[in-house]
Image (cartoon, rainbow, N blue to C red):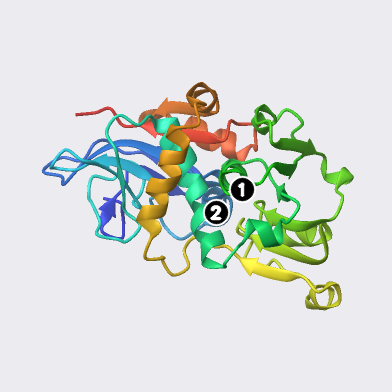
Amino acid sequence: MITQGDSQGRVVVENGEVTVLDLPNGPTTCRAIASIISPGTERRSLETVRDTGPHAPGYMTLVRCPDGRVSLDPVPHGATFLTNRPRRLSVPEGVRLPQIAAARFQLMAAVTLQQVGFDAGREAGDGHATVLGSGPVAVGCVFELMRRGLRRVTVVTARADSVLCDLGAVELVAPGDITPAPCVIDCTGAPDRAMEATAKGGWLGLLGTPANDYCVSALELHRRGLRVFGLHELGPAPSDYRAMFDTVLAWHLVQGWHDLLEAWCCVLPGKEAPTHYRAILARENLPPFLCLEWNEA
């Protein structure tokens, strides 16, 4: 049986291959409803985790608790055990999966920007920021910047047809057409490109996770006077982590773009997880939010 921490997962990755396990026999403490996939994290599992034995990926699983309440738990895909971790989030009944996925990715930017004291009026005094990337982390970041009152967000992406063009506040720019900006947030894990996009004396946030051996020039940082902030979600959990999720989710529920989020979300039955993983590994032009449904009783 494959375990991760104290939770059994239904999806197993071993040597780049993906297997979906049957629903476990015997008593369980909750029922998995759905999983939200983080493509960058999953891709690293497929590409770099080799010869370490099977492991259960995932950390965004929507579960129904024994008392009937629904929570978003930081456990592997399809897990049937609960945790008492501070990042376990309560979800109101009736909220649709695309809204939950959007709020969960937005939470990464919301809590980390708050932790480092990001002030939109100071760092983006002209109401404008630049975001590198167009995956779910970048989409969540754009949402958070909009929630914080920014009027304009430039998104640097090679995908000219990114769904982000559906948001009126967003301007898409190809990587070769970047104009240095005073406020830049990297959501791709490529800090050197983000540094090039940041004006001298500017604010640079690193929200995407770089590879272990990724390096940036300290001399370049020094000479250009950049203020660089690591925005990794797994830093110390802020005391208001759950409250921030509630705030972000409530913001989505009043925006009136339910149909938009539905179009940005691809949901497959859990047994078809390998289809999502093949597409992630092939770097196909996927919608931002990829989810798995676990409908078994």
Up-down: is 260 above or below 253?
Answer: above
Mark 2 in CB contact with mark 1 (< 8 angstroms): yes
Residue 172's quadrant in the figure? top right
- x, y percent for residue 25: 15, 40
Quadrant into which the C terminus falls: top left
Q: Which residue is mark 2?
A: 109
Up-down: is 43 above or below 31?
Answer: below
Frontmost residue, 51 versus 267: 267
Q: Judge the density around disc 2: few (<14), some (14-19), many (≥20) Cα neighbours within 10 Å.
A: many
Up-down: is 43 above or below 257?
Answer: below
Q: Residue at x 45, y 45 (%)?
A: 248
Q: Which residue is mark 1?
A: 145
Residue 154's quadrant in the figure? top right
Q: The disc labelled 1 sits on which kind of residue? A: Leu
Frontmost residue, 37 versus 204: 204
Residue 224's quadrant in the figure? bottom right
- x, y percent for residue 109: 55, 53
Q: Earlier in the sequence, mark 2 or mark 1?
A: 2
Q: In the image, 234: left or right of 270?
A: right
**Considering the numbered disc 2 on the image, is that residue within a helix, a strand or a loop?**
helix
Q: In the image, 273: left or right of 161?
A: left
Q: The disc labelled 2 sits on which kind of residue? A: Ala
The label nearer to you, 2 versus 1, is: 1
- x, y percent for residue 14: 45, 49
The answer to whether residue 59 shows anywhere in this view is no
